Image (cartoon, rainbow, N blue to C red):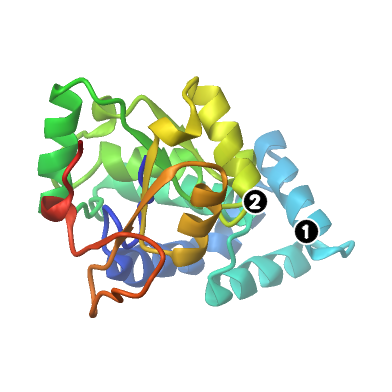
């Protein structure tokens, strides 16, 4: 099971392409679709998370502030995914996936290893990125996608819930991420862990095995 940002895909792509694209279009998107029941439900979720009875302009201001703060907000991620869908389908960009990740994901799938994604980005956004990637449609490689609707990525209960949904013991699942707090939560749930350190020097004193890319991963 793999994270996306900083693990299979470049952090720069997310922060320099996807986030600005959604930020620029968020206000117009919300105003144009506020009466759509699916969008209205997410806007109400923003109000609940903010703890305020915000009007539409206030909701938009809150969403922009959360984008700037890189907040892992479930309704924000859902709305971003809806905006990115148009970008992917219009060919404004393609989803960046590291070449080493593409090779090994394809190889592991060919070996019959079940692959899953757990990201703070919405399931819709995950499917769009892998479905419109630089390497083509990679979604057939995956058996399932999970986002923060199943739980926060730094809470062990999310990983326990995912293992139960997959139907495997946590110890039979390897979680790949570039974030120590997420790996700590996965380990607390009983999963195996591997820390992707794509930029910078690996910390050999850390509590998780570390590798620089997917080429360095050896599955036993």
The C terminus lies in which quarter of the figure? top left
The N terminus lies in which quarter of the figure? top left
The answer to whether 65 is drawn above or below residue 88 in the figure is below
Q: Position of residue 167 (x, y in %)?
A: 50, 20
Q: Which residue is mark 1?
A: 49
Q: Position of residue 55 (x, y in %)?
A: 83, 63
Q: Residue at x 68, y 72 (%)?
A: 61
Are the residues tagged 1 and 2 within 8 Å (C-beta)? Answer: yes
Residue 59 left/right relative to 55: left
Q: How many marks?
A: 2
Mark 1 surroundings: few (<14), some (14-19) or many (≥20) residues within 10 A: few
Q: Residue at x 53, y 70 (%)?
A: 70
- SS type, badge 2: helix
Q: Residue at x 55, y 53 (%)?
A: 185
**Quarter-of-image position of residue 212:** bottom left
Q: Give whichever of 163, 78 is nearer the camera.
A: 163
Work out which residue is located at the far bottom of the displayed protein and give it: 201
Gap between marks 1 and 2 measured at Cα: 9 Å
Which badge, 1 or 2, is on the more N-terminal residue? 1
- SS type, badge 1: helix
**Quarter-of-image position of residue 151:** top right
Residue 19 left/right relative to 220: right
Q: Residue at x 11, y 52 (%)?
A: 215
Q: Which mark is residue 4?
A: none
Q: Position of residue 131 (x, y in %)?
A: 28, 36
Q: Which mark is residue 75?
A: 2
Residue 126 left/right relative to 52: left
Residue 145 left/right relative to 34: left
């Amino acid at each position: 099971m793999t994270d996306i940002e900083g693990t299979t895909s470049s952090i720069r792509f997310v922060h320099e392409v996807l986030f600005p694209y959604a930020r620029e279009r968020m206000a117009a998107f919300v105003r144009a679709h506020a009466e759509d029941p699916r969008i209205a439900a997410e806007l109400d979720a923003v109000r609940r998370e903010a703890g305020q009875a915000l009007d539409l302009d206030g909701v938009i201001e809150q969403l922009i502030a959360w984008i700037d703060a890189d907040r892992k907000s479930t309704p924000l991620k859902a709305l971003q995914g809806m905006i990115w869908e148009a970008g992917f389908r219009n060919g404004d960009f393609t989803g960046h996936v590291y070449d080493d990740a593409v090779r090994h994901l394809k190889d592991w799938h060919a070996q019959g290893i079940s692959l899953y994604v757990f990201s703070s980005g919405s399931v819709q956004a995950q499917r769009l990125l892998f479905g419109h990637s630089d390497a083509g449609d990679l979604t057939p490689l995956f058996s399932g996608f999970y986002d923060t609707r199943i739980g926060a990525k730094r809470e062990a209960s999310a990983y326990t819930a995912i293992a139960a949904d997959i139907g495997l013991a946590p110890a039979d699942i390897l979680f790949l991420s570039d974030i120590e707090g997420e790996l700590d939560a996965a380990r607390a749930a009983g999963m195996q862990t591997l820390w992707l350190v794509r930029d910078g020097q690996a910390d050999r004193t850390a509590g998780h095995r570390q590798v620089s890319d997917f080429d360095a991963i050896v599955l036993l």
